[in-house]
Image: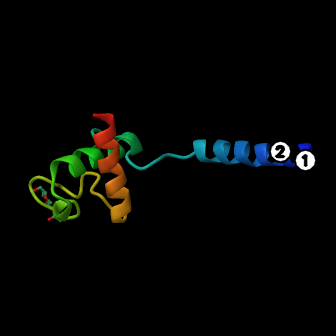
Amino acid sequence: MKSEILAIACVALSLRSIVSLYSYSGFDSSPMYGDYEAQRHWQEVTINLEPGQWYTNSSNNDLLYWGLDYPPLTAHHSYLLQIICN
Ligand SMILES: *[C@@H]1O[C@H](CO)[C@@H](O)[C@H](O)[C@H]1NC(C)=O
């Protein structure tokens, strides 16, 4: 049992170390930056627009700026977080 926990910890630590060596989407590209800004923006979009507009490009929803590109469950999750966190 102890050796299994040690093996899992080693794999987890190795994965984190390998991932940390590489960049992420939005890195160094102001003002998009990274995933935190994407998540913040999805909350902004879902709380301010009707669900029918979440995936449609418009002057209120520029899909090139962290447009929602995950299935609707993700969008509803962002919406829920925005309701809970406000
Ligand atoms: C989406 O909307 C933005 C803002 O109106 C515009 O700048 C952009 O060109 C549009 N993109 C597409 C693919 O239509």
The percent coordinates of residue 81 (x first, y second) are 35, 43
Give the amino acid type for the residue marked by disc 1 in the picture.
Met
Asked whether 11 or 20 is in front, the reply is 11
| Of 20 and 76, the residue lying toward us | 76
Quarter of the image where one finds residue 41 = top left
How many numbered dots are placed on residues in this image? 2
Q: Is residue 21 left or right of residue 43?
A: right
Q: Local crowd at mark 2 within 10 Å, few (<14), some, or many (≥20)?
A: few
- Ligand 1 is found in the corner quadrant, namely bottom left
Q: Residues within 10 Å of mark 1 (few under 14, many from 20)?
A: few
Identify the residue position indicated by label 2 in the image. Answer: 5
Tell me: 67 left or right of 70: left
Visible in this render: residue 2? yes
CB contact under 8 Å: marks 1 and 2:
yes
**Residue kind at label 2, given as amino acid type:** Ile
Cα distance between the residues tagged 1 and 2: 6 Å
Q: In which quadrant of the rendered view does residue 63 lie?
A: bottom left
In the image, taking residue 5 as reference, residue 55 lies left or right, namely left
* Closer to the camera in the image, 31 or 62: 62
Question: What residue appears at the point 37 percent right and 57 percent down from the top-left corner?
Answer: 74
What secondary structure is found at the residue carrying circle 2?
A: helix
Residue with the mark numbered 1:
1
Residue that appears at 79% across and 44% down = 10
Q: Position of residue 24 (x, y in %)?
A: 46, 47
